């Protein structure tokens, strides 16, 4: 396939293409795109930009993770990049990873994060890193990230850069990254690439959103900035679409192959909840994106276009009650599609009462006129309220 338009317009479903592997023409990018087969069941590796790290094309996402045996199996299958963050389940994910790192640190590239906000200070970030090191049972993090950046202005906090330099000097961290999946993702990435302070970018990436990402990845690759992507499933709603995954086809595999068809992407981070998924996702890298994959993704996108919340927050300024639409819908997704009910309810319980959709019942829903995807925003929020309503009785400790 030739290089084609990769996104789906909300009204006209255009062609999804496989040719996202256009060469940048620069030696560093060519090295970053180099693929190698391992002896471990077909896992492939790509060089992560200027870090020089050889990372598996599928990386281990640990949100909701607490079963160390899953990680052992993934490492045995050749997965070597482990993505986590200090705040995942309030440190539980890192602790589960640490039980494996105690004996298999040499087999892994550790990628964790601290939560950096506009008022975060160097000392508190370094304290977070030390706590992560303890939970992970290691003295060194390969990549440390400023986790879940929500606004380009947050990149102006120099405390995060000072903290990283101190950690690097102390031998506690090797490279700096950021992660982002908020509605202004493209603006955040653009600013991060312009600053050229981050060695790696980690962001949401799928076949239904952010059409400018391909160009941004190209610009990042020119500067030697590596790219790791996640949330490639565009909501993970395939179980609701009758007959979609018939004849052995998998939206998960197709999404991984779609993302990896962009040669500026080094690794796809996927959340692994069972042993079958390890086999499914590792098998995905053994084949190239096919026309059948493209058609499957097109069918999925068409089916969920007006139900899948992109968490863009476009509608939020028009809510007369100040409901945090993006957060509420994200927690609903965790509950309904990620099967992380308790975690979703705990996150919802932490929302201020005024940010919850209690007032939506009798609201005329001006938000719906502002949604660029014609979603039934009010209906989605009321469903989220029903799913998460027991949150008041869930401890957030």
Image: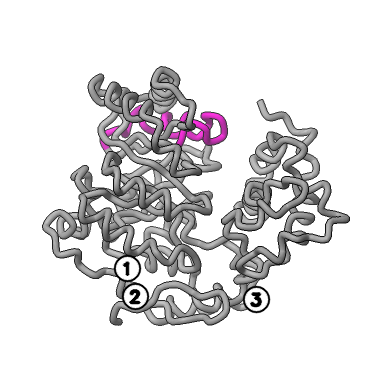
- Secondary structure state at the residue bearing disc 3: loop
Residue drawn at (64%, 54%), measured in percent from left and top?
333
Q: Nearer the viewer, residue 331 or 244?
A: 331
Q: Mark 2 or 1 closer to N-term?
A: 2
**Residue 306 in the image, given as x and y percentages of width and height:** 65, 70
Instruction: Tell me the quarter of the image containing the N terminus.
Output: bottom left
Name the side, left or right, on which 169 lies relative to 262. Answer: left
Queried whether the magenta region covers residue 282, the answer comes back as no
Measure the C-alpha gap from mark 1 to mark 3: 27 Å
Measure the C-alpha gap from mark 3 to mark 2: 25 Å
Residue denoted by label 2: 18
- Secondary structure state at the residue bearing disc 2: loop
Q: Mark 1 or 3 closer to N-term?
A: 3
Queried whether the magenta region covers residue 94, the answer comes back as yes
| 276 versus 393 height, above or below | below
Residue denoted by label 1: 261
- Secondary structure state at the residue bearing disc 1: loop
Q: What is the basis of the colouring in this image?
A: one colour
């Amino acid at each position: 396939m030739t290089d084609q338009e990769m996104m789906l317009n909300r009204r006209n479903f255009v062609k999804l293409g496989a040719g996202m592997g256009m060469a940048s023409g620069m030696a560093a990018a060519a090295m970053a795109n180099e693929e190698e087969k391992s002896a471990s069941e077909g896992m492939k590796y790509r060089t992560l930009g200027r870090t020089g790290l050889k990372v598996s094309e599928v990386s281990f996402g640990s949100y909701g993770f607490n079963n160390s045996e899953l990680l052992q199996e993934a490492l045995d299958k050749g997965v070597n990049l482990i993505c986590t963050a200090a705040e995942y389940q309030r440190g539980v994910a890192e602790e589960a990873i640490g039980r494996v790192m105690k004996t298999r640190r040499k087999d892994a590239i550790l990628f964790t994060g601290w939560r950096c906000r506009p008022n975060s200070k160097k000392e508190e970030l370094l304290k977070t890193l030390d706590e992560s090191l303890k939970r992970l049972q290691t003295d060194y993090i390969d990549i440390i990230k400023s986790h879940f950046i929500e606004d380009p202005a947050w990149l102006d906090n120099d405390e995060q850069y000072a903290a990283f330099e101190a950690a690097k000097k102390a031998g506690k961290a090797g490279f700096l990254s950021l992660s982002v999946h908020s509605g202004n993702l493209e603006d955040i990435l653009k600013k991060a690439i312009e600053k050229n302070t981050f060695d790696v970018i980690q962001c949401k990436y799928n076949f239904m959103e952010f059409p400018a990402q391909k160009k941004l990845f190209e610009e990042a690759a020119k500067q030697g900035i590596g790219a790791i992507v996640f949330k490639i499933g565009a909501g993970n709603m395939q179980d609701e679409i009758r007959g979609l995954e018939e004849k052995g086809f998998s939206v998960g595999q197709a999404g991984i192959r779609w993302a990896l068809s962009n040669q500026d992407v080094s690794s796809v981070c996927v959340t692994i909840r069972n042993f079958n998924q390890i086999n499914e996702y590792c098998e995905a890298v053994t084949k190239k994106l096919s026309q059948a994959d493209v058609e499957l993704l097109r069918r999925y996108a068409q089916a969920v276009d007006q139900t899948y919340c992109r968490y863009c927050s476009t509608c939020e300024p028009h809510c007369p009650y100040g409901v945090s639409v993006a957060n509420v819908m994200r927690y609903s997704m965790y509950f309904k599609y990620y099967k992380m009910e308790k975690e979703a309810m705990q996150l919802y319980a932490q929302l201020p009462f005024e940010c919850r959709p209690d007032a939506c019942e009798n609201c005329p829903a001006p938000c719906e006129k502002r949604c660029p995807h014609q979603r039934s925003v009010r209906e989605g929020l009321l469903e989220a309220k029903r799913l998460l309503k027991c949150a008041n009785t869930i401890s957030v400790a």
